Amino acid sequence: MTQKLVLDTQQLKHLAELLLGAAYADGDYDGHEAEAIGDILRGQVHDGELPAAVTGHLAGFDIDELVVEDAAAGLALGEANERRAVLQLISEVTHADDVLDHEESEFIRVVGRALGAAPEEYEDLTFDLVTIQVSSPPPIPE
């Protein structure tokens, strides 16, 4: 379910950057993620029609030029509920392809920190990898 924020066109462009960053975080940007991003962004505008400046920004997006801290600062969010809403929207994108990935989880953490959110504001949207140490069995006797 898409959260509704009150964002101007410039803020929408920054939100789009973060959503696209989430989609690219695992190195595999797919149609499900693209669809989720479109749905999320259209859900942020009154008539469901994205401004041309936003669609143009989406078309010209280059993941190699994304600076998460700049995009987060451009959103100019002050309230914890606004930060949480953005993080939930990012989480929607990371779940769109039905594959949970460590890089996507880490991207949520990076954005959370860039937004000035406390870890408890986003940790439930992330996961940690667990490593299991398996000892080698003894050699087979001859």
Image (cartoon, helix red, strand yellow):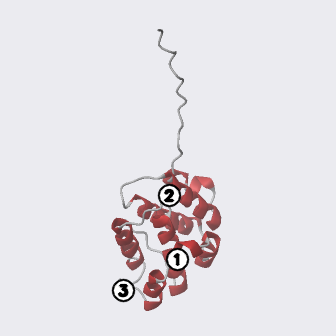
Check disc 1 and report its element: helix, strand or loop. Answer: loop
Q: Which mark is residue 62?
A: 1
Determine the residue located farthest toward the top in the rendered image. 142
- Residue 40 location, x and y as percent? 40, 73
Front position among marks 1 and 2: 1
Three-letter amino acid code at the position of disc 1:
Asp
Check disc 3 and report its element: helix, strand or loop. Answer: loop
- Residue 20 vertical placement versus 101 (above, below): below
Q: Is residue 74 left or right of residue 91?
A: right
> Residue 135 lies in what quarter of the image?
top right
Determine the residue located farthest toward the bottom in the rendered image. 52
Q: Are marks 1 and 2 in contact (CB under 8 Å)?
A: no
Check disc 2 and report its element: helix, strand or loop. Answer: helix
Task: Give the class, few, some or many, for how many residues have Cα within 10 Å of label 3's Cα (few <14, many ≥20).
Answer: few
Q: Of callouts 1 and 3, which one flags the residue occurring earlier in the amino acid sequence?
A: 3
- Residue under circle 3? 49
